[in-house]
Amino acid sequence: MQLIDTHVHINFEAFSNDLAEIAERWRASGVVCLIHSCVTPQEFGSIQRLADRFDELFFAVGLHPLDAHECGATTIVEIEQLALSDSRVVAIGETGLDFYKAENFELQHKVFEAQLKIAQKLKKPVIIHCRDAAAQMREQLQTFWDKNGPVSGVMHCWGGTPEETQWFLDLGFYISFSGTVTFKKATQIQDSACIVPSDRILIETDCPFLAPVPKRGKRNEPAYVRQVAEQVAKLRGESLETLARETTENACRLFNLTLAANHKPQLAYSGQENFAVLS
């Protein structure tokens, strides 16, 4: 059984002392690939060094909405240049809108729009962070599509209602569930996990945050994506093996990866545009 953790932050200080042991655990749990998200372009070097160390790690580059205030005159150009500088960059992000912790709404929209344009130009998916901003996110994405054409991507660490989930499915996006889907009171997330089509569902840890039950409250790590997979499979009435196969195939499709005979992920280079189509 193969699993792909589609959103990690293993460059954070929480992992500085025992990363080799953490890698042993994710491999023992069946995790064959990780997608490392990026909060600011300044992280790029540290993420790149991790990818040098772990062949199964691919990564993104982008600016998180809560760091939108750090967007300077050259930041967007820098993101594009960094995305072009390393073939292991498989996405732009994480980017998006977060109206829970910040009120610089106009700036977040502007910075998000700029990164959507990079993703579209480079034919890479976008990793979207959306918190307390589903309606605004839907409107901005629909407007972008109407003006500029499609861009592919994933709603990461999804916490929306089934209705909101359908909004982004209708826009062609993948939906990724994290450890929150295992929380007892997260009923709307659990309901959402049941309606996502089998060819559009992904799993992640978002580690070191949001460890799943029974590890809740502790440091999260990629090995725990198995607990996420187990819960999502249970909710959907599927076997763990089926859910693992579906999410692995979906991650490979979205991020243009293929798994070699030795289970090591490689860039697919299919030559095909990596865009989902409108439902």
Image (spheres, helix red, strand yellow):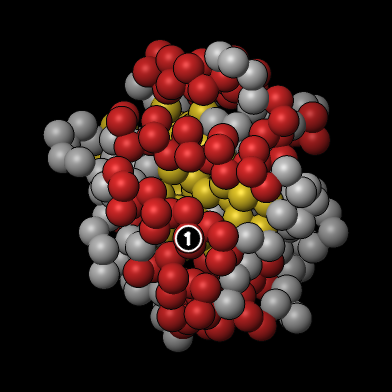
Horizontal side, residue 186 vs residue 116: left or right? right
Residue 250 seen anywhere in this rendered image of the structure: yes
Where's residue 10, x and y in %?
66, 35
Extreme residue toward the bottom, this view = 237
Residue that lies at the very extreme toward the left in this rendered image: 271
The location of residue 254, given as percent across then percent down, is 33, 48
Query: Which amino acid type is shown beneath numbered disc 1?
Result: Glu
Q: Up-down: is 108 above or below 202?
A: above
Which quadrant of the figure contains the N terminus? bottom left
- 172 above or below 257? below
Residue drawn at x 45%, y 85% as measured from the top left = 237
Q: Nearer the viewer, residue 279 or 238?
A: 279
**Figure check: 234 above or below 92:** below
Q: Is residue 26 something that shows in the picture?
A: no
Q: Residue at x 70, y 77 (%)?
A: 186
Q: Which residue corresponds to the image point at 48% horizontal and 62% vertical from the top-left?
A: 138
Q: Residue at x 64, y 19 (%)?
A: 72
Q: Nearer the viewer, residue 88 or 245?
A: 88
Q: Position of residue 125 (x, y in %)?
A: 38, 42
**Label 1 neighbourhood size at 10 Å, few (<14), some (14-19), many (20+)?**
few
- Which quadrant does the C terminus fall into? bottom left
| Residue 159 falls left or right of residue 236 | right
Residue at the spot of label 1: 139
- Is 111 positioned to the left or the right of 101 in the image? left
The vertical placement of 240 against 269, above or below, is below
Dot 1: what SS?
helix
* Drawn side of residue 131 relative to residue 257, left or right: right
